[in-house]
Image (spheres, grey):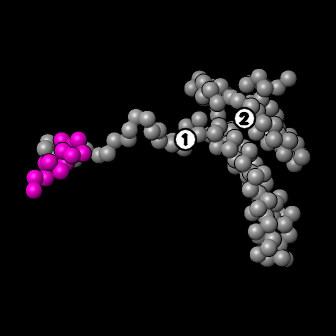
Amino acid sequence: MDINKIFGAFNSSSRDEGHWNYYQQPSHITMVDENHPRYFVKMFTKMILSYTGYSDKIIDFFASADPEIDANNVKRAGECMLYERAYEYITKIDLHDEYHVKIIFQEANPKLEEALNKIIFYFENEEEYEKCAILKKYLDFLNFSS
């Protein structure tokens, strides 16, 4: 058995050259960079818009598991955690950084606008007006506001 033929079957001459090449990611597949502005915008949007779809199921699950659990308190705690985390994601976008601005404009769409409006509505109800003002800057910057 010729080990070079085995490695040659995988189009790798690294064994012939006396060193190993690490697997290279195909160019059409992108790696997720959790510190990239696109990731921040997409996570923000996904969190806000996906929450309402599964939150009721989770709350029902906890309520049926333990009837003494106050479902309203669980719901409020879940919403609080969600909106605070989503707020952290969107505020990582620096509107003074050219690259961040480029990315947020590339990601600007009706879903992002809807998510921004939902989070502002939430923080208005919680009377956290400082956060509303910061979030409104994103709406204004993207010309979503009227």
Q: Secondary structure at mark 2?
A: helix
Image point (47%, 38%), residue name: 30
Label 1 to label 2, Cα distance in Å? 19 Å
Q: Is residue 62 left or right of residue 99?
A: right
Look at 80% across and 66% down and name the residue there: 60
Q: Which mark is residue 35?
A: 1
Closest to the observer: 10 or 112?
A: 10
Q: Is residue 31 above or below residue 63?
A: above
Q: Quadrant of residue 103?
A: top right
Give me the residue at 74% from left, 56% from top.
54
Q: Is residue 33 toward the left or the right of residue 25 in the image?
A: right
Indicate the position of residue 90 as horizontal and vertical percent values. 68, 39
Q: Is residue 23 on the magenta stretch?
A: no
Looking at the rendered structure, the kind of residue marked 1 is Asn
Instruction: Say whether residue 11 is magenta.
Output: yes
> Which residue is denoted by mark 2 in the rendering?
112
Residue 120 visible from this viewpoint: yes
Residue 128 visible somewhere in the drawing: no
Q: Quadrant of the C terminus?
A: top right
Relative vertical location of residue 130 with respect to residue 140 in this rendering, above or below: below
Quarter that holds the N terminus: bottom left
Image disc number at residue 118: none
Type of amino acid at the residue the image marks with label 2:
Leu
The span shown in magenta is 1-14
Helix, strand or loop at mark 1: loop
- Tell me: residue 99, above or below residue 41: above
